[in-house]
Amino acid sequence: MKLSFPALLDAGRRTFLVAGLALATTLTIAPIGAQAQNWTTERWVGTWGAGPGGPPLPANTQTFTDQTLRLIVHSSIGGNRVRIRVSNEMGSTPLRIGAAHIALRAGGADIQAGTDRPLTFSGNTSITIPPGAPALSDPVDLNVPALSDLAVSIYLPGTVGATTIHGTASQTNYVSLPGDFTGAASLPTQRTILSWPHLAEVDVDGGQAAGGAAIVTLGDSITDGTRSTPDTNNRWPDWLARRLQTVRDPILGINTRLGVINRGISGNRLLSNPAEGSLAGRSIQERFDRDVLAAAGVRYMTLMIGINDIGNSSATNPVSADDLIAGYRQVIARAHAKGIAVYGATLTPFEGAGYYSPEKDVVRQAVNNWIRSSDEFDGVIDFDRVTRDPAHPTRFLPAYDSGDHLHPNDLGYQAMGGAVPLELFRSVGGAYLKAEQKQVQ
């Protein structure tokens, strides 16, 4: 029987619908592979992070030959599953990871019994990471307490140059004798280092019901914790993380599932890149996507940047307040486009530092006045007011000065971490109330 065109079209539609239904049914009942994860129920949040810098000049590049790195990091929040992010983002050649493990640290280079977990990457125990790329490990079950030390062990076969590295860790890390000791309870240590090669982030997953979000603290050496006492976790973001774990205030509604990811890099700038071979990181505008948007669970960020732009500017081509403000506006716009609230931090005093001049301090003061009064940030953290000497406001309070008149000491970092209004983070997963945030200032 010959069918009309409408009848043919209708028959075709019925055939398509039946075939589509069969395909959907097949997809629905298809077995899930052993490596597959139900990503719809996962909620990954960064519990630790560092900003990658490099590549250093060849003469200054740390080299590892058939050795295991045991890198110590301090969690901000806890979780029951964990994964790591390894970075070759500043490298120009492939990076071979022969094996990787994670465990709770017992002390020194030792790990707690029963906590060692081998890590895989895409189901494999090893991975080659292309130049310019990161790699996420597969998740493993591990009960990670908040504010605890983790030991991430990475075996590097062959000879590897640390072209992607966080140079100012303020944390003792360990390099083994030759061999794969990623699962060793006690690492046979050849030497120690105060940097984090190739490790960029540790994430935890407490499940969707647990909620949670991350705060990225983006900045330079003052956020990085330069001149704080090594191995004590006395950077100001560390003090913020402690407060978030200890405050129990139902009125403020503080959610203790707030992770803190420290993306401060010593020497970093807002507008320009450092000289070739520096570990000061690319400019904030260049590294924003990598160090903020790619962070797991990011919902908030703090921005304290610009003192190196001001201090390193030349008399013939000085950086102006308008230049910096234009840069801040770019960061704000890019963060808001991804639903991230941005809190501006005022620049701390620096009279007495090597690159200080009265003319440069005028720029700093103008920037601070704009941060406080412009209403363009979602909130303000006034570090300048907290750390300056009331009798000499262009200088650090002597009790907070590390001695170089640019960086705080441990007590100064504690005061900074204590000055962050926790009310800024009251709305995890809820409506963002900018008017309420402004009342905090």
Image: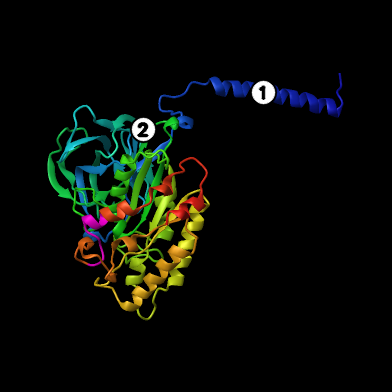
Q: How is the image coloured?
A: rainbow
Q: Residues within 10 Å of mark 2 (few under 14, many from 20)?
A: some
Res. 202 image quadrant:
top left
Residue 13 position, x and y percent, is: 75, 26
Residue 245 position, x and y percent, is: 32, 40
Q: Residue 397: in sight, yes or no?
A: yes
The region drawn magenta spans 405-413
Q: Nearer the viewer, residue 360 or 57?
A: 360
Residue 48 vs 10, above or below: the answer is below
Horizontal relation, residue 27 to residue 302: left or right: right
Which residue is situated farthest in the front direction here? 251
Instruction: Confirm whether the magenta stretch covers residue 407.
Output: yes
Res. 365 image quadrant:
bottom left
Q: Nearer the viewer, residue 311 or 380?
A: 380
Residue at left offset 70%, top offset 24%: 17
Dot in front, 1 or 2: 2
Horizontal relation, residue 165 to residue 335: left or right: left
Q: Amino acid at mark 2?
A: Pro
Residue 98 position, x and y percent, is: 27, 38
Element carrying mark 2: loop
Q: Residues within 10 Å of mark 1 (few under 14, many from 20)?
A: few
Residue at mark 2 = 139
Quarter of the figure with the N terminus: top right
Q: Amino acid at mark 1?
A: Ala
Quarter of the figure with the C terminus: bottom left
